[in-house]
């Protein structure tokens, strides 16, 4: 019940004085919540716990080329994932969560080149973390995360998109590859 109230779509007629509708504010809040919950755990909490468990320094004292390369990949990953999350809210009228999926097929922006750029952004970020901390454990974790993403996409997301978006999704799959 709490989730249903949290995700309820208010009427579009309830636009505020500044022109934003309550629906858009609700959508942005839901996206923020699910971003912290899902990618936040995968690319933030879990790598942090792995680093703590393996005894890595969280902030390296001296930066070398591997640190700068890893940091660059992390920034690229955040930009990719962030732009996709924003597109889910604005174009798809939904969130990244399977509990509150997009209402429209998102096939613009980075989605013109990959059906799963948000996952690519997350993997790029985790690989950057592995490089930054020179962590074999995080490198292995990135492979496990990629396999998990791939299985989730094949077993859950693609069937849902075929069911929800029909021929539009079938045509999209014919024109855009799953990854690159």
Image (tube, rainbow, N blue to C red):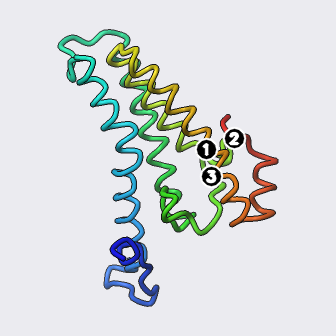
Figure disc tally:
3
Of the two numbered discs 3 and 1 on the same chain, state the one appearing first in sequence: 1
Mark 2, residues whose alpha carbon is within 10 Å: few (<14), some, or many (≥20)? some
Residue marked by disc 2: 178
| Rendered location of residue 13, percent (x, y) | 44, 90
Mark 1, residues whose alpha carbon is within 10 Å: few (<14), some, or many (≥20)? many
* Residue 156: image tag: 3
Asked if one can make out residue 25 in the rendered structure from this viewpoint, the answer is no
| Rendered location of residue 170, percent (x, y) | 79, 56
Q: Is residue 130 left or right of residue 64?
A: right
Residue displayed at 20% across by 22% down: 59
**For the residues carrying marks 3 and 2, which lies nearer the camera in this image?**
3
Q: Is residue 147 left or right of residue 15?
A: right
Mark 3, residues whose alpha carbon is within 10 Å: few (<14), some, or many (≥20)? few
Residue displayed at 44% across by 26% down: 141
* Residue 116: image tag: 1
Q: CA distance from mark 3 to mark 1?
A: 13 Å
Most foreground residue, 70 or 46: 46
Of the two numbered discs 1 and 2 on the same chain, state the one appearing first in sequence: 1
- In the picture, the quarter occupied by the C terminus is top right
């Amino acid at each position: 019940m709490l989730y249903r109230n949290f995700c309820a779509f208010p009427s579009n007629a309830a636009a505020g004085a500044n022109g934003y509708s309550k629906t858009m504010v609700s959508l942005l809040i839901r996206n923020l919540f699910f971003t912290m919950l899902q990618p936040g755990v995968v690319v933030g909490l879990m790598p942090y716990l792995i680093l703590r468990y393996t005894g890595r320094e969280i902030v390296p004292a001296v930066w070398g080329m591997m640190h700068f390369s890893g940091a660059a990949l992390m920034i690229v990953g955040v930009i990719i994932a962030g732009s996709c999350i924003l597109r889910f809210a604005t174009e798809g009228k939904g969130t990244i969560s399977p509990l509150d999926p997009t209402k429209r097929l998102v096939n613009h922006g980075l989605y013109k080149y990959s059906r799963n750029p948000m996952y690519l952004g997350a993997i790029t970020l985790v690989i950057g973390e592995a490089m930054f901390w020179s962590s074999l454990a995080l490198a292995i974790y990135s492979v496990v995360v990629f396999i998990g993403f791939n299985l989730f996409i094949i077993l859950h997301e693609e069937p849902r998109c075929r069911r929800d978006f029909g021929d539009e999704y079938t045509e999209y799959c014919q024109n855009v590859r799953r990854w690159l």
